[in-house]
Image: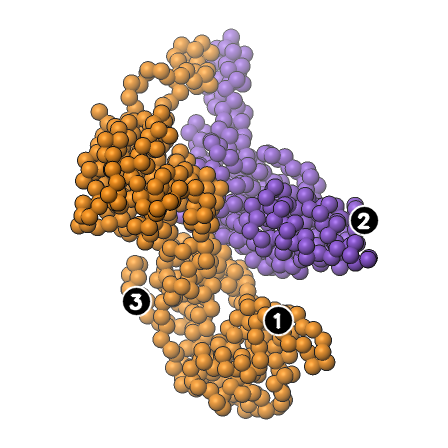
Chain colours: A purple, B orange
Amino acid sequence: MWEQREQRQGKIRHGSVIIIGAMADGSVAEVKEALAGVGYLADEPAALVSFLAQKLGKPVLVEGPAGVGKTELAKALSRATGRELVRLQCYEGLDEAKAMYEWNYRKQLLRIQAGGSQGDWDDIQDDIFSAEFLLERPLMQAIASPEPVVLLIDEIDKTDQEFEAMLLELLSDFQMTIPELGRIEATTMPIVVLTSNDSRELTEALKRRCLYLWLDYPNLEREMEIVRLHAPDISETLARKLVEVIGMIRALDLKKPPSIAESIDWARTLLLMGADDIDRETFTQSMSIIVKHRTDIDLVAERVGVKLADPLRAEG
Amino acid sequence: MPTPYGPKADAGPPGLAAKLLGFCEELRGEGVAVGTSEMLDAFAALSEVGWTSRADFREALAATIAKSQDDRRVFELLFERYFFRTAEAEAVQRGVTEHAEGAPPAGEGERFDISELSEAIREAMMAGDEDRMRDLARLAIAAFGRAEGSGVVGVDVQRIRRTLGLTAGAQPPTADGGERPPIDREQLTGFERHLRRELERDLIERTETLPPSRPLAELDRALPTSPTQDLAAVHRAVSQMKRRLATLGHEQRGRKKGQMVDVRRTMRASLETGGVPLRLRYRPKRPRRPEIYVLCDVSTSVTSASVFFLSVLHALHDSFRKLRSFVFIERISEVTDVFEHERDFAAIAQKISSEGGVADVSGYTDYGRVWLEFLTEISEELDPRSTVIVLGDARTNGREPHAEVFAQIAERAGRLFWLNPEPKLYWNYGDSVMAAYERHCDGAFECWTTKHLENFVNVVAGAAPTPE
């Protein structure tokens, strides 16, 4: 979210500078520090669960409302540990061929036709079912990678229950079975992060294999720290005012409450506008950054907008 | 208290492991599914974090044991209670008291006057400083709690609060006329919790016995978002139903007819024949997902049952993608959208009652009219693989039942079930015309508890009419 270099699916290599040899055998506080070092201010539970995930080698299931930084946690972990991030974006109808592996049959065909004249059939047979003809999809990538990775399975609640069942072998034993090749075990222990927006109850079997972390909107102080970390030029008073207004907006019953990323965007917008206070005018002008629904805009303008100082009246 | 996992363990040997097991037992008793694997994880996690930090200890346990928001809530409640009791029991057993060391009894060294104390408490509440609040609570008790204590903790808490002049909402101005920010309800409750805890500790110390533990009150553990405690059970029964319905009556018929050639598989198979596609491969016929239509009566005669029915609907929507739901009183109204866009049960219930669009003029159900409307709206889409489930009491208020229309629906739909919130005994008494409808159903069941729902699922699975 806060990182622009992001692809929908596949590999992202971070030019990370932080070496977390210390993180692997450190304490909870060190994990927290390391995460803060890469721009993610984790609260106590988040830091603790990240720490446990590494220590116990268990997947983490992160749930919470949209926009509290669930995905960002995985990315921060990848940056903090200097591991590569392998991301699987889930969607309805996602299947094995897209998530695990697929045989590259075109290449297999080519191999047969190319080697056909020599007629060394046994060789071909052995050959075409080797790793060379396998198209690795994210899950396979994470397992087969020689370097330890961070595997992010994003929005698991968007998939079917059947897909969850398929994940179980991977999550509990970090291995995968391919009929032609046999069992592939992870050589290195990946950190697995699953996120869910709680749009559907996940199965017991999946939950049983995971550590559970509920992320919620941060409190004022922490959100202020986050905003100031990502928009360092903002003054303290403005930042405080900003998170207070955001807090008020979240308290309303909105279709889409503003996320942390939107707080940051708003802070940056205010800086660009050169505002040094949030009055009614700047609020109306920049409201569309944080509220993105027709009915929400009306509600917010009505409930929050009027509480802010009116610049015209203040001068007059 | 016997639990589903066997008789409750007694206090057992001392030590942290035993205490943790006891804690898990209590959680199970409250319906949190703590499996052996969770307990092993908990122990593994605890060997990685320091036990001395209360926050770390609790979070490590929570991350491994409580796997949902509901569980987490129960966990928090029990954690506080269990470890408080455990610590106190240990203290009583070993005869440890806080004043034993010859320290001056609290309240003697420094004389607080009331306004100063309440000022300090206000500050601590505003800052949300838990430790300071606890200290101040003890001070308050020491200052004027013990002497005139009534012995009933709840009464004492309120008495001390009143003496200190602490109220929620706007605060009186300070002595020198400055304004004070208002204190909200939660902050005050936080302080009261500390007061209560310290009073209880005091009481235990004096009497050297623990008050009996009791299961959590239903109200305490109910999440504000789930008005029915049955919600989880309903969800379980429905997910069971999903598996049954998905595999029932979908035997593949006419195997080769109308099948699609699967290019990818054909090419792959052609590898065996040197790239010549000798054998065609077909797309496998996947069993079709069942299409479900649910009609739910929300009139006044089923008020007591409709919360249950709505939770059934809620659970159905969680499990089935091809599900359309309708609510009806006098007329019918589709609410599929509401369920798809709302996750929160309370919000759904509220939305349906406010904007469900149910034309509710008289508040009396008109079944005949509902069938007619349903048929005109849906008839094209009903086919043999659709299942219709009606949730209602079949009380027509003396209006025309239109059983023949209902028969048409039954004929078009693959299967039709009726769940009636009244005991079978009351069917066909008064204005109930259940018999007229029952003839056309593949099954009619009484259903007002999750037990009944499970029964329904089992019967559907066992005795469902197989097609052909």
Q: x, y percentage for residue A23?
A: 63, 53
Q: x, y percentage for residue B84?
A: 46, 73
- Identify which residue is drawn at 46% across, 18% down: B264
Asked whether, in this view, residue A300 is left or right of residue A154, the answer is right
Mark identifier at residue B450: none
Label 2 residue SS: loop
Viewport quadrant of the C terminus of chain B: top left
Query: Closer to the camera: disc 2 or disc 1?
Result: 1
Label 3 residue SS: loop
Q: Please report, as a chain letter, where disc 2 is located.
A: A
The residue wearing badge 3 is: B1
Q: In front: A304, or A171?
A: A304
Mark 2–mark 1 contact, CB under 8 Å?
A: no
Question: Looking at the picture, which amino acid does disc 2 mark?
Answer: Gly
Q: Could one spot residue B249 in this view of the protein?
A: no
The residue wearing badge 2 is: A274
Q: Earlier in the sequence, mark 1 or mark 3?
A: 3
The residue wearing badge 1 is: B170
- Identify which residue is drawn at 56% across, 45% down: A255
